Amino acid sequence: MNLLDVENLWVKFPTRNGVFDAVRGVSFTLGQERLGIVGESGSGKSMTGRAILRLIRPPGQVTADRIAVEGDDIMAMSEKEMRSVRGQRISMVMQDPKFSLNPVMRVGDQIVEAYAIHAKSTKADAKRKAMEMLEAVSIRDPERVYRSYPHELSGGMGQRVMIAMMMVPDPRILIADEPTSALDVSVQTQVLRIMDKLVQERGMGLIFISHDLNLVSSFCDRVLIMYGGRIVETCVADKLHEAQHPYTRGLLNSLPRLDVKQERLAVLERDATWRDTDSVSGAR
């Protein structure tokens, strides 16, 4: 059984000029793997992740034939039932931890709170679990970080804390939305290594949302390429550079390369018909 099944997902927003389709008929599955979703800003990547957790609020509208977590259709769940899904079964790491962490609460209290929502435990047990998760994300001095406020942490440390907070309820699926875009290369590598280790050890599924094609091709198992709210191509990650769709080729050709001398980078051309055609059938 797949960890996640998404069938014909649409996200719509009413505007003065009519209804805007932010996500248009997206369908995919997720197993115990690292699934990358890439595309330009505005392609619908983050909106897809938020829609899976039903975090799109009115006037936004989310419809789907089916969004199932281990066979349970969350589209049929009440808001109360969804609270047990968010965090406990699916967690989401946002792009910038400074906007996700409460600035007036100590880090440890926030992790304990995330754990207490989904597990009945004593305060001592909750702190022990929080300390274990801080150690799991390779924080050298977990006791100090536990007592710290978010503003006292670096960007990389804050992102590790967010991963620890999202992983503490032991979810089956982790959605990571641009988790390393604000980090330098060395810290980025450390965070990816931590996420990879946690996913493999726990048999989880990871949805890795990014605009960095090289990063996704080296880190993920499969890649979905989105344009205009649609999936235009699906590739095995390590064969991403062999992609055939003209949009994917355009994204790849616009990347700077050190091994090939280029006078100037190619300009990405777009075709309006790509928004209206069915997804290209790629490697599954």
Image (spheres, rainbow, N blue to C red):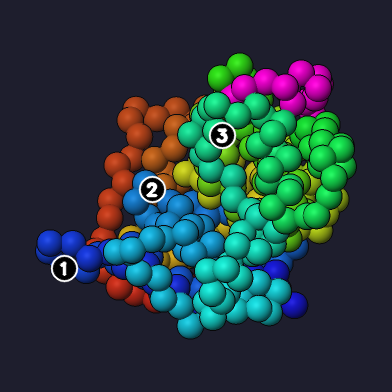
Disc on res. 40: 2
Given residues 267 and 101, the one toward you in this image is: 101
Looking at the image, residue 99 lies above or below residue 26: above
- Expressed as whole percent of the image width and height from the top left, the position of residue 276 reads 30, 73
Q: Secondary structure at mark 2?
A: loop
Given residues 234 and 200, the one toward you in this image is: 200
Depth check, mark 2 against mark 1: the one in front is: 1
Given residues 72 and 123, the one toward you in this image is: 123
| Mark 2 surroundings within 10 Å by alpha-carbon count, few (fewer than 14), some (14 through 19), many (20 or more) | some
Which residues are drawn in magenta?
A: 138-150
- Expressed as whole percent of the image width and height from the top left, the position of residue 103 reads 53, 27
* Residue ID at (47%, 44%): 211
Q: Is residue 271 left or right of residue 239?
A: left
Q: Earlier in the sequence, mark 3 or mark 2?
A: 2
Say which residue label 3 marks. 101
Q: Earlier in the sequence, mark 2 or mark 1?
A: 1
The residue type indicated by label 2 comes to Glu
Say which residue label 1 marks. 18
Q: Quadrant of residue 149?
A: top right
Contact? badges 1 and 3 (CB < 8 Å): no
Q: Secondary structure at mark 1?
A: strand
